[in-house]
Amino acid sequence: VLTNFIELPKSSKRAVIVTINRPNQLNAFNTDVCHSLANIFHSLAKYFHEQSSGNDGNDGEYEDVVAVILTGTGKSFCAGADLSNPPNPLDQSSELEHHLRINPVFQMDSLRIPIIAAIRGHVGFLFFTMKRLLFSYEYFS
């Protein structure tokens, strides 16, 4: 999973682009992708939580970020689970704190800025993120 930043036109704000980078596997989810996405969204949510709490003791990496763009490399957004090394379904459905920490959908729900999905090709991952996309629409409308 890759991250980079883009400057938004006519603004001093930025967006972070989160890219699933397994084009030869059509960006199918495996355990590593799941954990990487969870870590990225956890870091973003933690940064914004600290900012809203008045704690500016962080490194400012996400300063001026107002949105996340989630995409995939190659011709597919995400073809679903990689059955050769799928994420553990118990980890992804458990409410235990240590499982929530590695659950990307839970971490996405913790983030209070829009997540925009740049989708093309296969979209198996959309099923898992539909709740988050609908939440973003309702929250920011």
Image: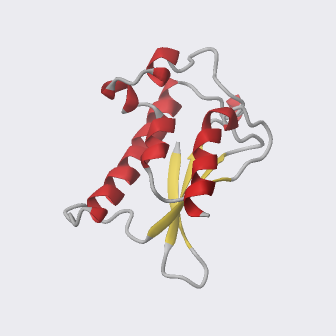
Q: Is residue 17 left or right of residue 119?
A: left
User: Is there any visible trace of residue 68 in the rendered image?
Assistant: no
Judged left or right of residue 74, residue 134 is left
- Percent of width and height locating residue 78: 69, 36
Q: Residue at x 67, y 45 (%)?
A: 73
User: Residue placed at 62% from the left, 64% from the top?
Assistant: 141
Q: How is colour applied across the structure in the image?
A: secondary structure
- Residue furthest to the right in view is 121
Image coordinates of residue 117 in percent, x first then y, are 66, 51
Residue lying at 58% horizontally and 54% vertically, measured from the top left: 136
Residue placed most toward the observer, 100 or 134: 134
Q: From the top left corner, tell me how far across and down residue 125 is, in percent.
A: 66, 34
Rendered image quadrant of residue 25: top right
Residue 9 visible in the snapshot: yes
Residue for point 22% across, 67% down: 54
Q: Up-down: is 18 above or below 107?
A: below
> Relative to 73, does residue 138 appear above or below in the rendering?
below
Lateral position of residue 27 relative to residue 68, left or right: right
